[in-house]
Amino acid sequence: MALTENKSMLSWIDEMTELMKPSEIVWIDGSEEQLEQLRKQACQSGELIKLNEEKLPGCYLHRTKPNDVARVEARTFICANSKEEAGPTNNWMEPSEAYKMLYDIARGRYAGRTMYIIPYSMGPIGSEFSKVGIELTDSIYVVLNMAIMTRMGKAVLDAFGNESNDWVRGLHATCDIDEEKRYICQFPQDNTIISVNSAYGGNVLLGKKCFALRIASYQGWKEGWMAEHMLILGLENPQGEIKYVCAAFPSACGKTNLAMLIPPEVYKSKGYKVWCVGDDISWLRIGPDGRLWAINPENGFFGVAPGTNAKSNPNALASTRKNTIFTNVAQNLDDNTVWWEGLDKNPPVNAVEWKGAHVNGPEFTAQGNKLAHPNSRFTAPAKNCPCVSSEFDSTTGVPISAIVFGGRRAKTAPLVYQSRDWNHGVFVGSTMASETTAAATGAVGVVRRDPMAMIPFCGYNMAYYWQHWIDMGEKLGDKAPKIFHVNWFRTDDEGNFVWPGFGDNLRVLDWIIKRCEGKVGAKETAIGYVPEVDDINLDGLDFTKEDLAGVLNVDTDLWKAEIPGIKEFYAKFGDKLPEKLQAELDTLEAKLAE
Ligand code: OXD
Ligand code: MN
């Protein structure tokens, strides 16, 4: 029986039922009973493996097909009405052609299968920030992951009511997991997402990247708010005051680690604490007080497992100890637990590697093989996190004091700098870049531009997106958060990272908050404000002031060498590039020439 009487929902579901021809239809009501029954069913079919109930209560392991282990940007399309609206950084397909192609691929593909109807809310149910979606899927794995990553079930529909048509349609069909016919398509003008031939998280948990970033960034543009690829954290000082920061880094630059940071001892002992509101996405609106407020639209973490350990991120590890779904990690058959590279130094002897082969872990890894896929994941409830913020479910969100951009740069960007003002900050975000590492591409030091870490996720022309940022800054006026850039990845001449990173990044956050409060000065450089060496607290750290001066150094020649790359990147946007950004580029060039 349908869980809603909303006509726009029911008629779309009817249309999709006609197209997909499911043998059975199940509405997901969000009850623990129903989810438990689905877990049992998935264990019987082999889709999930139940892990050790004592050591990992409520945890399961899932293996995807080896050809389906990551987001596929080359097969991700923004089906805007015109190519120009999708912009030069997105793949584009004409919407009617895309619908035809996708419906041809998907037609009848639920035959003999169950269609699960998942009503979900991105953001706390009933919050003004929140948006509702319906995902149709034939995968229990998707249902169970969505149950962790979103607020879902009947309560969402009850709060949404029967009138509104403002909800996102999401169709997922597993089909044959055929890479050649895999498509992840967003139709921003129609509030619609269609994903076929994949069963991997980022491509099929439609609430996450597809909705909360691609569709939502478009909605934010039209409706006057912002959807960003940003973590949200709260930094509590010994007086109990909490200041909130949003930060955007490209994938694989440590967002989850920063979001759950454990302060170094000198800070902890004084009473400093870090609270995690979100590790990946934030939705930002101007509040009644004129400040910028943020919520995390998600309800869980879809984190990369390899490298997560008791030292790098104890809070993330703790989050995975119950009610978690692991994807493509290794299984330890001796105690039916999980393992991944970087968890500890002891790969299990009696192991099943991520593709399902039974191997001797130490021998297998000694031969250079990976037991867990490098993009293996945990899907963990946010409430599991020991440092989850008390504001996590707040319907009004948290007020943002600072926005931090970051990238992986060996030499150019200093440890931290502050933009001169909002528009300069937008310029800094728009020129964000990371250098590739040898492990990733074989070509070391290739600069990849990833503005605001949104290159794979902006649902419309990035030039319009930048203009939207500029417009938001105008509305915020002097209540706008201050904008910073950080780089934890400066290297010495031997290629070793200089700054210790991890928990010690709090020392940089501390400076950022002091700047927001006007409690500390700074040195003006061509690229913005850089800390004075005495203003970053190095207590308890084996790191000299000379070392610090080294990572704070702004090398004018290197920055001059940056300019042609920025120009080349901006040129892609032609006359759509906001004038204010061109002006910022001219200012930078002039300041570097001084
Ligand atoms: C992610 C990503 O999975 O950014 O969060 O790739
Ligand atoms: Mn991400």
Image (cartoon, rainbow, N blue to C red):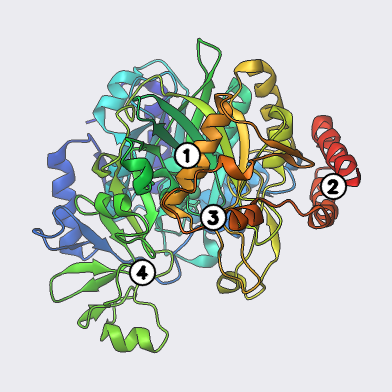
Q: Secondary structure at mark 4?
A: loop
Which x, y percent locates residue 382? 30, 41
Q: Does label 3 or label 4 sit earlier along the sequence?
A: 3
Q: Point out the image quarter for the C terminus.
A: top right
Marking on residue 342: 4
Q: Amino acid at mark 1?
A: Ile
Marking on residue 73: none
Q: Point out the image quarter for the N terminus.
A: top left
What is the spatial separation of the Cα atoms under label 3 and label 2, in whole angstroms?
A: 29 Å
Q: Does label 1 or label 2 sit earlier along the sequence?
A: 1
Q: Which one is closest to the eye, mark 1 or mark 4?
A: 4
Marking on residue 281: 1
Q: Which residue is mark 2?
A: 571
User: Of residues 550 and 224, which is closer to you in this image?
Assistant: 550
Q: Does label 2 or label 4 sit earlier along the sequence?
A: 4
User: Of residues 33 and 462, which is closer to you in this image?
Assistant: 462
CB under 8 Å between discs 3 and 2:
no
Q: Does label 1 or label 3 sit earlier along the sequence?
A: 3
What is the spatial separation of the Cα atoms under label 1 and label 4, in whole angstroms?
A: 25 Å
Q: Which one is closest to the eye, mark 2 or mark 4?
A: 4
Identify the residue shown where x is 36% and y is 65%.
64
Horizontal side of 243 relative to 555 (left or right) equals left
Q: Which residue is mark 3?
A: 183
Horizontal side of 572 relative to 119 (left or right) equals right
Identify the residue shown where x is 33% and y is 60%.
311
Which x, y percent locates residue 349? 22, 83
